[in-house]
Image (tube, coloured by chain):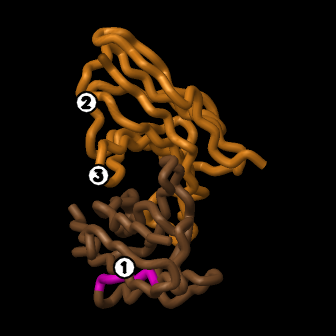
Chain colours: A brown, B orange
């Protein structure tokens, strides 16, 4: 099955800093989502981005499906951005497969 | 519009007990899923239902059964709970199953299950 890698595994930032999270996947996909799991365990949809670039406030995401990776950009980070960020690509005809996540801690 | 609703939010079971986790969605989605998340890990698919009347095994189905009661509801049953099933369980739904473009998934708030 598809292999999903996320980097870095852990990231500590000072409030206001920018960061880039990466998701690499081993097979062709027709769908990819980014999720934020907050410290209370809730999974929040960030982006549904099978290809191209999307922006939502301080967050943006880019997926280059032909090269099998996706990037999540967080600008001007805030303490409320802390948590775990998961990418979940979906190969053709299959279900979502979650990566191991990037744990982000934003310090005040 | 509640989205995906799971009950209960927390549960403690003794080894060997049985229980059913309930999930309901109000988005008129065709596909529903059950995942488990172990500490420090991503989510793994237990079972899914591509459409009403169908269910299929995911990556980690052993020890679980599911029922797609109707289009809205998808339940997960543990017949004889084991400590290895201690986990957080998430239900999700999407408009269409895999293979289609419009397949954004939405998740419930999770059920934290402890088996002692």
Q: Which mark is residue B62?
A: 2
- For discs 3 and 2, the disc positioned in front in the rendered view: 3
The residue where tag 3 is placed is: B41
Q: Chain of mark 2?
A: B
Residue depicted at x 42% and y 66%? A85
Residue contact at pointers 3 and 1, CB within 8 angstroms: no
C-alpha separation, residue under disc 3 versus residue under disc 1: 17 Å
Q: Residue at x 49, y 63 (%)?
A: A36
Q: CA distance from mark 1 to mark 2?
A: 33 Å
Q: Is residue A69 part of the magenta span, yes or no?
A: yes
Secondary structure beneath disc 2?
Answer: loop
Which quadrant of the rendered structure holds the N terminus of chain A?
bottom left
SS at circle 3: loop
- Point out which mark residue A21 bears: 1
Apparent side of residue A57 relative to residue B1 in the rendered image (left or right) = left
The answer to which of marks 3 and 2 sits earlier in the sequence is 3
Which residue is drawn at the image coordinates 52% and 86% (left, top)?
Answer: A75
Magenta extent: A68-73
Q: Nearer the viewer, residue B38 or B72?
A: B38
């Amino acid at each position: 099955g598809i292999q999903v890698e996320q980097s870095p595994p852990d990231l500590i930032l000072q409030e206001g800093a920018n960061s880039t999270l990466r998701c690499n996947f081993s097979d062709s996909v027709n769908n990819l989502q980014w999720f934020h799991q907050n410290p209370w365990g809730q999974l929040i949809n960030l982006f549904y981005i099978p290809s191209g670039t999307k922006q939502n406030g301080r967050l943006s995401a880019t997926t280059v499906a032909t090269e099998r990776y996706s990037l999540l950009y967080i600008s001007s980070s805030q303490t409320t951005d802390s948590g775990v960020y998961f990418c979940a690509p979906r190969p053709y005809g299959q279900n979502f497969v979650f990566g191991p996540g990037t744990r982000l801690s934003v310090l005040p | 519009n509640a989205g995906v609703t799971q009950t209960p939010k927390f549960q403690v079971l003794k080894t060997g007990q049985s229980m059913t986790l309930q999930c309901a969605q109000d988005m008129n989605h065709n596909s529903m899923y059950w995942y488990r998340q172990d500490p420090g890990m991503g989510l793994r698919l237990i079972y899914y239902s591509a459409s009403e009347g169908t269910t299929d095994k995911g990556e980690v189905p052993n020890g679980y059964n599911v029922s797609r009661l109707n289009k809205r509801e998808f339940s997960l049953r543990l017949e004889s709970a084991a400590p290895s099933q201690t986990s957080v369980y998430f239900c999700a739904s999407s408009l269409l199953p895999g293979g289609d473009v419009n397949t954004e998934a939405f998740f419930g708030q999770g059920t934290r299950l402890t088996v002692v």
